[in-house]
């Protein structure tokens, strides 16, 4: 209810105008698909029956491995996609950071939680 989804959609749309790279937007359903500019690749993660964070990480690896031009990946509804407590996701953020550095990709993630509720390993990424 704080406008996170609108902000992340706006970021993705703005990036399609300014970036020389491909933009990917991942959500847990298709309700916002039509709000994205057609230059952004929309991924409805619910179509892939992801059971846990490992499977979601595999989806991200697949996206990156099939398109070397991806420069931004926006992830909405992170807690619904990862399907576990945020305190159990340190491994995920370490792998995401390594994937980002190795492939020069920026990740923007919306997480429905107050900043005080976030584990320390996530707080360093808050914008």
Image: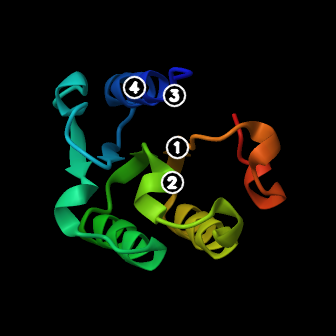
Looking at the rendered image, the disc whose residue lies closer to the viewer, 1 or 4, is 1
Q: Give the residue displayed 62% in from the left and 64% down from the top.
A: 85
Between 60 and 20, the residue placed more toward the observer is: 60
Q: Which residue is mark 2?
A: 79
Q: Determine the CA span between mark 1 and mark 4.
A: 16 Å
Lower position in the chain sequence, tag 1 or tag 4? 4
Lower position in the chain sequence, tag 1 or tag 3? 3
Q: Which residue is mark 1?
A: 108
Lower position in the chain sequence, tag 3 or tag 4? 3
Do the CB atoms of the residues marked 3 and 4 lie less than 8 Å apart? no
Q: Position of residue 70 (x, y in %)?
A: 35, 53
Q: Determine the CA span between mark 3 and mark 4.
A: 21 Å
| Element carrying mark 2 | helix
From the viewer's perspective, tell me whether residue 99 is left or right of residue 41: right
Lower position in the chain sequence, tag 2 or tag 4? 4
Q: Determine the CA span between mark 2 and mark 4.
A: 29 Å
Q: Residues within 10 Å of mark 1 (few under 14, many from 20)?
A: some
């Amino acid at each position: 209810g704080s406008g996170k989804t609108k902000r992340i959609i706006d970021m993705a749309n703005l990036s399609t105008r300014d970036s020389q790279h491909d933009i990917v937007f991942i959500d847990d359903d298709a309700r916002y698909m039509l709000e994205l500019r057609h230059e952004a690749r929309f991924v409805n993660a619910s179509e892939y029956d992801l059971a846990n964070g490992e499977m979601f990480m595999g989806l991200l690896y697949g996206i990156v491995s099939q398109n070397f031009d991806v420069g931004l990946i926006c992830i909405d509804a992170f807690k619904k996609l990862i399907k576990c407590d945020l305190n159990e996701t340190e491994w995920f953020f370490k792998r995401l950071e390594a994937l980002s550095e190795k492939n020069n990709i920026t990740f923007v993630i919306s997480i429905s939680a107050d900043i005080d509720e976030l584990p320390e390993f996530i707080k360093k990424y808050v914008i």
